[in-house]
Image (cartoon, grey):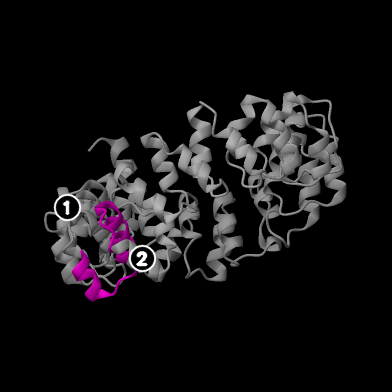
């Protein structure tokens, strides 16, 4: 095996091993000293304070973020070994404001520009300092992520950021109204509805306005007269659009599909569009949210596509007996049935036998899938990757899957992997070499 490929395989095995919930303590103690595995190890639930300190000592920003988010470390515990780690610390509510102050004075403008996005909160003096920063990039990032006293700026870049920011006060957004900033204001959900409505005069804004849910009905009617497909598609998906406008939009197959997936579509229009929109077994929001009485009525519809939509929703809600009955409706429903946690091992096996790739992938993720069933899932590449991490997969197959870089990480994360194999992987030997010779 070429050295580069072998190195990639070993890396995948070690990364998978680092996330293995059955990893013995003596191997975990060994792996925490490897800086390259810090990010994967930080997500574990069996980290002792000593292990946490070791992981923090690597100066890995991703690992630090994971440990802070999990509550395994406090900002005061983190050694500020580099700018990336310091930025992560500022994202915590209990961070020392002094860390942000130091970063705000950093000589590198790219570091100062990252601070506003990372920081959970910034002290007023830091906001004032960044608002006066000579770099427009820094000021732009500030106004995008924090409320500032800025009402205008000489830089077009900063003005654009003010118009796009949801932190910009409504009165400032109203004062920015101009053709040069029209698209930014139209795409900003914080732009007052009255200001947004006034932007209709600029065609470039209408694509964004069609997504808004706070415009007068007359403006939706006006937008429905547009010829631009993107505008019409956004409008057809918008739940705030009046029903009569939705009906007028359903004139092409793409628009019918968009209207059909609009969560506010009336049921009579749904039944009308179902045969021509060709959604198959795909879940439709309005059917998902339907009441029991509505589902019952739709389930008896003479339109086959409507009945399929109801069956798809039913497959996510049915008990074991109901799933057996639904499975007889056809293989098109099997992926949905296999995602139901109440699906039995026997039904999973029957569906996997000769099943489609989508069915195999769903079965491979089901906790109740048996080893025999999971072997059937190895026929599809994506399902093979999913099955490699399944604890019910036979051990011999788990070990064999270590030989492929595509499945090595998943197989190494499998809690059913024998401890001797885990130990060999932790040593960097790569069990695949022993298997393949």
Residue 295, numbered circle: 2
Which residue is found at the position 62% from the left and 26% from the top? 204
Disc 2 residue crowd, few under 14, some 14–19, many 20+, Cα 10 Å? many
Disc 1 residue crowd, few under 14, some 14–19, many 20+, Cα 10 Å? few
Front-most of residues 114 and 209: 209
Residue ranking furthest to the left: 354
**Image quadrant in which the N terminus is located:** top left
Front-most of residues 332 and 369: 332
Which residue is found at the position 70% from the left and 31% from the top? 199
Q: For residue 132: magenta?
A: no
Q: Are marks 2 and 1 in contact (CB under 8 Å)?
A: no
The residue carrying mark 1 is 435
Name the image quarter holding residue 200. Answer: top right
Q: Element under label 1?
A: helix
Give how far apart the Cα atoms at labels 2 and 1 are.
Answer: 54 Å
Horizontal and vertical percent for residue 310? 32, 61
Decide whether the magenta segment is chiefly helix, strand or loop.
helix
The boundaries of the magenta stretch are: 300-326
Question: Eyeballing the image, is 56 above or below 233?
Answer: below
Horizontal and vertical percent for residue 56? 59, 57
Which residue is found at the position 80% from the left and 55% from the top? 97
Name the image quarter holding residue 334. Answer: bottom left
Which is more N-terminal, label 1 or label 2?
A: 2
* In this view, the mark in front (2 or 1): 2
Report the side of 114 relative to 1 (left or right): right
Name the image quarter holding residue 5. Answer: top left
Residue 96 visible in the picture: yes
């Amino acid at each position: 095996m070429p050295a580069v490929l072998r190195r990639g395989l070993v890396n995948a095995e070690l990364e998978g091993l680092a996330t293995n919930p059955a990893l013995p303590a003596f191997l975990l103690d060994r792996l925490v000293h490897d800086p390259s595995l810090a990010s994967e190890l930080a997500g574990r639930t069996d980290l002792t304070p000593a292990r946490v300190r070791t992981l923090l000592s690597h100066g890995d920003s991703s690992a630090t973020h994971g440990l802070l988010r999990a509550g395994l470390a406090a900002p005061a515990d983190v050694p500020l070994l580099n700018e990336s780690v310091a930025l992560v610390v500022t994202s915590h509510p209990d961070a020392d404001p002094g860390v942000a102050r130091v970063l705000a004075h950093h000589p590198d403008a790219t570091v100062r520009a990252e601070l506003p996005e990372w920081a959970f909160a910034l002290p007023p003096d830091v906001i004032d300092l960044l608002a006066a920063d000579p770099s427009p990039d820094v000021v732009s990032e500030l106004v995008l992520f924090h409320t500032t006293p800025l009402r205008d700026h000489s830089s077009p870049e900063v003005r654009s950021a003010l118009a796009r920011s949801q932190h910009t006060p409504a009165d400032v957004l109203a004062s920015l109204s101009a053709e040069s900033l029209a698209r930014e204001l139209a795409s900003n959900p914080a732009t007052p509805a009255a200001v947004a409505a006034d932007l209709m005069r600029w065609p470039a804004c209408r694509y964004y306005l069609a997504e808004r849910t706070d415009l007068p009905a007359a403006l939706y009617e006006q937008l429905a007269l547009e010829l631009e497909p993107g505008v019409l598609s956004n409008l057809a998906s918008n739940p705030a659009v009046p029903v009569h406008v939705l009906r007028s939009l359903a004139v092409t197959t793409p628009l019918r599909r968009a209207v059909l997936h609009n969560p506010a579509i009336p049921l009579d229009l749904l039944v009308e569009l179902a045969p021509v929109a060709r959604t198959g077994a795909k879940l439709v929001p309005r059917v998902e949210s339907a009441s029991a009485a509505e589902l019952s009525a739709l389930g008896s519809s003479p339109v086959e596509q409507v009945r399929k939509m109801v069956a798809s929703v039913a497959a996510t809600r049915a008990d074991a007996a109901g799933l057996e009955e639904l499975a007889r409706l056809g293989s098109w429903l099997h992926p949905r049935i296999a995602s139901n946690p109440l699906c039995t091992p026997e039904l999973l096996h029957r569906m996997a036998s000769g099943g489609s790739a989508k069915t195999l992938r769903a079965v491979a993720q089901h906790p109740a899938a048996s080893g025999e069933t999971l072997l059937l899932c190895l026929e599809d590449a994506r399902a093979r990757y999913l099955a490699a991490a399944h604890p019910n997969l036979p051990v011999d197959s788990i070990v064999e899957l270590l030989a492929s870089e595509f499945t090595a990480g998943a197989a190494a994360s499998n809690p059913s992997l024998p401890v001797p194999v885990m130990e060999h992987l932790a040593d960097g030997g790569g069990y695949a070499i022993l298997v393949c010779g």
